[in-house]
Image (cartoon, helix red, strand yellow):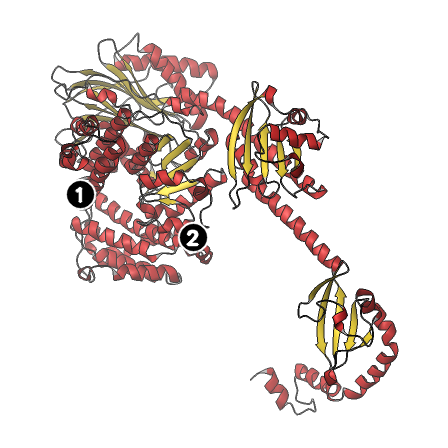
Amino acid sequence: MTGADVRDLDPGDGRSATPSVARVTARRPTTSRPLPALERLQGQLAADWPEIAEHLREGVVVCGPDGTVRQISPVAQRLLPELVVGGTLAAVERLASLDPHLRHHGRRLRVRRVPLSAGRSCWYVEDVSDSEKRAEELAAERSRSAFLATVGDKLGNPLHPDRAAAAVVRLAVPTLAEVAVLVLAPRSGRARWWRARHGGDETPTVDRGVLAASELPPAIVESLRGTQPHAVDWLVEQTIEAGWLPGAAASEVAARLVPLPGRDASAGVLLVARGAGGWYGEDDVDLVRAFAARAGAALTTALLYREQAEVADTLQASLLPVEPTPTPGVQWGTAYRPAQAGLRIGGDFYGSHRLPDGGSVFFLGDVSGKGVEAAVFTGQLRQCLHALHRVEQQPAKLLRLLNDALLETTLAHGQGRFATMVLGVVRPDRDGGLGLTLAGGGHLPPLVLRSSGVVEQLPLTGMLIGVVPDPRIGQVTTRLAPGETCLLYSDGVTEARGGRRGEELLGTERLVQALSGCHRMPAPALAERIEQVTCDWLAQRDHDDIAVLALRATGVSGHPQRHLHAVPTLSGPDPEEMIPG
Amino acid sequence: MTTATRDTSPETVYQDYLRSLAEADEHAAVEVARGLLDAGVAADRVLLELVAPAQAEVGELWARNEWSVAQEHAATHISDRVVAAVAAYAEVRPNRARIVVACMDGEWHALPARLVAEVLRLRGWQVTFLGASVPAAHLMSYLHRYDAYAVALASALPMRLPHAHRMIEACRRSDVPVLVGGRGFGMDGRWARRLGVPWAANAVAAADLLSDERALRAPAPAELTHLADDEYAGLVNRRGELIESALAELTQRYPAIGDYTPAQLDSTISDLGHILDFLAAALYVDDGSLFTEFIEWLVTILDSRGVPGATVEASLEHYSRLLHDFPRAVDHLQRGRAVLPARAVGSGRPAPRAG
């Protein structure tokens, strides 16, 4: 039952009614006798009409059934002066059409027609020039804000200066210009420029080039210096002369030049140009300036980032693990995955050094802590080893020497850092196998993949390196027959957390399981397999540094090395390539 | 362009090459490839008509359980060395901009991406190949450091699509256009279209696409409005709990699971997780075929390893029950159940899962 039903059932005397129903019944009398009141009102209205009509926002035109104008209110008369009482609406062009929008004497009018009784009709005319202008201004302001918001959004991210510069010119077209040229402040006498041109569709064409600082148009030089040029006509000609506006005539182009604020001097200047009929009003110039401010901030950030990144890269490169040196009879395999992927360095390390007798000393370890500080410590440690292996080649003794050296440094710096590591010496046998002597400093014992398929854990123990003056160092010797592999790995592997809820450790058992049946794999593939198994187990969770060093006995009877010399090692991008071109 | 005779075409030496992969004989494999190059076969043909199809076949051999994981890894490693040898043979001076080629984080099959990288290099692009499983943070810091004209991202696993989307967005925020490739975006690239990213079917298509900056920079917008229903987010948040309850249910229904070795149990848990990850990816791109294709593949893999599909059926049923208030997920799960072979349905005793 709805409220309406209740109302219909209401007895009307209010006795049994609920309060809401009572209100409904109370309103009834007013709606049941409206006519007398309205008649009285109409009488008054007729009397007051001329005065009221004068102050109505809308003008009123009343037409008879034959279309002749019978009445025109003063407002309507002002808006449509051509109309006369007794004439027709045809005096105003398009008034009688159904289009409610009308432009008349420079004003925007909104017209609506309401049919009256006895075939008459009434035309209401309103002047909406001001409100539409305000709406347009608002829309323009909104589109400017939206443009600047997009610009802020897109310029905030490219941290590479070239990317940022290309983004600046691309974003300027077509909103600010048909052609936008960004000239960066010259560095060592050369100024690089980017240009975007409107290409008809939404994606502008971007190109770039370099000019000697001495060849720059004078207006650009002045603007870079911070003195805004006044001679705008000259600017266009200079721009054409510089070749940035191919095929344009100076008289047809409007251009503006805005400096991009930098850290102290300008980061560069932005030139915006519009062809035939385009011009730059005050609002446009304000928008170009606002754009330039954001572009300047983005470029400055990118340039600052590059400076910092150049320093960081140089330091980083010295702290990255160095791939083991080629050793006869040994195939090396490595995997390295630092906890902080963006940093690329961490607290795990590995490496090798050639010995004069044809063998190699190799090591893998993990220092306490993570990130940059840990990486710096691995650097110190590797340098120590680099020097010490020249005086001592017996693994346990070498590890003790390293312990003393580290203890001295950490005490001197008050760091309290230490490391765990396995250090070994490998020497090729006459029969193609490898003889291994390994010393352990509190690190996870190495695994050996035998030709039989058995995965063996070497019984290697020992104490942390860099903690006490005379640590107990374990030592073990073993032999790798051709095709057998010894694996050193960091605890980032076995302590990777995964499983059902991401809390279970990978553990040695799972690692051994994952390696069973892999004894025929080449060392690099084996190292990668461990990395992959660990990462699969992690399922994108955070992890500790991960490092693997595998060495496989290739055997002397193997294929000659001659052909494979043509094959470059696969250790990430070539250093040559890292230099930006 | 080539003086190769019929005797020295990639097809004629294909079986020799595959045999050297099977025997993990790096030297022989490199010799086969160099033989072709010496006979005048173009480097990109060696890559695309010898190395690529052989690697695809290796993947199939593994899926049919004819090859072990170890053999597959070894073969991949050798193919990689062959690619390096071919690249070194055909030295090309780069005269075009820098392209960064990378595999998605969690994507370990680097060879297809590497082939793309080498084909691009042969066409004059300056290519940086970042390798397998590139963490997003690494890629971003690389792009901030070294300018790139474009990034080519490879993914073979559809379950990584949501992650791929985040990576694509990150590159674009750095104003670097992205193009993607690999089966992970659908055989016809349909999931790439969902994500609004240009897709290349193969290395040649990738090279063509890179030459068209407009196409690269103006892809169709992503169609992901369905994500508003939060089914994807809800599923991801409940992943651990869902796996645990599914495992409990399976153990109750099939007591044999209680006797699984730890390795078998890990495999079962990993399968249960994969079902959810693929389901989540299907929800992300709103395409049930992603999930059904995965179920078909999973059944093939389990079948070739002697594991009946009954547990798959039971898991799908269990997930449907628990996710009853996720209509799209339930629909995908039902379609997944529909493609299970008839004999898998029922209460067969599951054989232990091979490791």
Specify few, some or many for label 2: CA neighbours under 10 Å numbering under 14, 14-19, or 20 or more.
some
Amino acid type of disc 2? Answer: Ala
A539 shown above or below B231: above
Q: CA distance from mark 1 to mark 2?
A: 36 Å
Q: Is disc 1 in the same subunit as disc 2?
A: yes
When asked about the image quadrant of residue A475, the answer is top left
Element marked by disc 1: helix
- Asked if the residues shown at circle 1 and circle 2 are in contact, with their CB atoms under 8 angstroms apart, the answer is no
Relative to A556, is B269 on the left or the right? right
Q: Earlier in the sequence, mark 1 or mark 2?
A: 1
* Residue farthest toward the top in the current orientation of the protein: A391
The residue closer to the viewer here, B85 or B338, is B85
Residue where numbered disc 2 is placed: B233
Percent x, y of residue B219: 44, 47
Q: Nearer the viewer, mark 1 or mark 2?
A: 1
Element marked by disc 2: helix
Relative to A266, is A433 on the left or the right? left
Relative to A12, is A387 on the left or the right? left
Chain of the residue displaying label 2: B
Residue where numbered disc 1 is placed: B61
